[in-house]
Image (tube, rainbow, N blue to C red):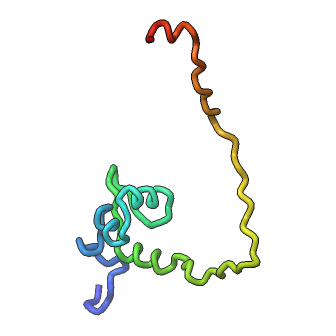
């Protein structure tokens, strides 16, 4: 290989790789959120065994490409708010206990 040729894949250094804690500090979010985002593919990460490794340039590129909410149109006073549909409760609330005559004799 000639001296002026650049290798196809540059070697990774410790400065190129980040762990979960370092990504959490960089993005100002909890480590649990970083892990969840990595699992869902929101942020790029590589799982090696039980450990997650993040490459600094991939994280920086994904943050730069993330859509910005800054350019979203502001709601005007004439816009009607979206109707929120209420979902049925999974478990109905328990009715308050009815006072029985027998209970007052036992504890009264």
> Percent x, y for residue 86?
70, 49
Which quadrant of the structure image shows residue 31? bottom left
Residue sitting at x 29%, y 67%: 22
Which quadrant of the structure image shows residue 60? bottom left
Say above or below: 2 vs 18: below
> Percent x, y for residue 19?
30, 63
User: Relative to 19, is 65 on the left or the right?
Assistant: right
Say above or below: 75 vs 46: below
Figure label count: 0
Say above or below: 107 vs 51: above
User: Relative to 97, is 15 on the left or the right?
Assistant: left
> Percent x, y for residue 16?
29, 74
Single out the residue that lies furthest toward the left. 14
Which quadrant of the structure image shows residue 90? top right
Q: Who is closer to the viewer here, 41 or 81?
A: 81
> Percent x, y for residue 45?
41, 63
* Quadrant holding the N terminus: bottom left
User: Relative to 48, is 91 on the left or the right?
Assistant: right
Q: Who is closer to the viewer here, 54 or 68?
A: 68
* Quadrant holding the C terminus: top left
Residue sitting at x 33%, y 81%: 7
Residue sitting at x 75%, y 70%: 80
Say above or below: 33 vs 90: below
């Amino acid at each position: 290989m000639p001296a002026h040729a650049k290798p196809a894949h540059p070697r990774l250094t410790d400065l190129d790789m980040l762990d979960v804690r370092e990504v959490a500090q960089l993005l100002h979010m909890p480590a649990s959120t970083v892990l969840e985002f990595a699992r869902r593919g929101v942020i790029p990460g590589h799982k090696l065994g039980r450990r997650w490794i993040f490459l600094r340039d991939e994280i920086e590129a994904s943050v730069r490409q993330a859509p910005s909410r800054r350019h979203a149109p502001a709601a005007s006073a004439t816009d009607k708010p979206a109707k929120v549909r209420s979902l049925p409760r999974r478990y109905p609330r328990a009715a308050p206990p009815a006072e029985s005559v027998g209970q007052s004799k036992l504890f009264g």
